[in-house]
Amino acid sequence: MRVRIRIVGTQAFDGETDRITQTADGELTLQGGTATLCYTERDDDGITTDVTVTADTRAVTVERRGPARALLRLRRDERCRSVYGTLYGDFEAVTMTHMIRNTLSENGGELALAYTLSIGGQTMENTLCMTIERNELS
């Protein structure tokens, strides 16, 4: 089903917190308790990244395909190893997920995460909230 996605994310690092807010149109598929959300992000320079989010009530996988690549695995109360790829090489990323809230259904809903991300010896606290609504017009 076609959906409109509102994404709000925060990242706290070294005493400062950054916040991003963006919207995107995408596709939501529900099958057997698992939701798959596909959309394209566009940054201020017009660079696009294809994103696929797969979620149930205990685990989330975020795959990003573009100039920077990532495959983040998030499982509640577990440390997960992932890969974050840039033009300069690949980096190991470790996530520790504190909260997953998934209310996605055929009517839309919300996917919210809180997790710690460690890359290259640096640790950041992150939140992500995706609010999904049916988008019958696109």
Image (cartoon, grey):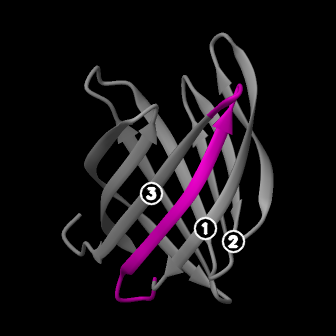
Sequence-earlier tag: 2 or 3: 2
Above or below 64: residue 48: above
Q: Amino acid at mark 2?
A: Arg
Q: Callout 3 environment at 10 Å: few (<14), some (14 to 19), or many (20+)?
A: some
Q: Amino acid at mark 1?
A: His
Q: Alpha carbon of mark 1 to alpha carbon of mark 2: how far? A: 6 Å
Q: Quadrant of the N terminus?
A: bottom left
Q: Residue at x 18, y 69 (%)?
A: 137
- Left or right of residue 76: residue 47: left
Q: Main secondary structure of the magenta part?
A: strand
Sequence-earlier tag: 1 or 2: 2
Q: In the rendering, which numbered label is found on residue 51?
A: none
Identify the residue under disc 2. Answer: 76
Identify the residue under disc 3. Answer: 127
Above or below 98: residue 134: below
Magenta segment range?
Answer: 104-122
Q: Quadrant of the C terminus?
A: bottom left
Identify the residue under disc 1. Answer: 98
Q: Residue at x 32, y 55 (%)?
A: 8
Give the percent coordinates (x, y) of residue 73: 71, 55
Q: Quadrant of residue 98?
A: bottom right
Q: Quadrant of residue 7?
A: bottom left
Q: Alpha carbon of mark 2 to alpha carbon of mark 3: how far? A: 13 Å
- Left or right of residue 94: residue 107: left
Q: Amino acid at mark 3?
A: Thr
Say what secondary structure mark 2 lies in.
loop
Q: Callout 2 environment at 10 Å: few (<14), some (14 to 19), or many (20+)?
A: some
Above or below 66: residue 118: below
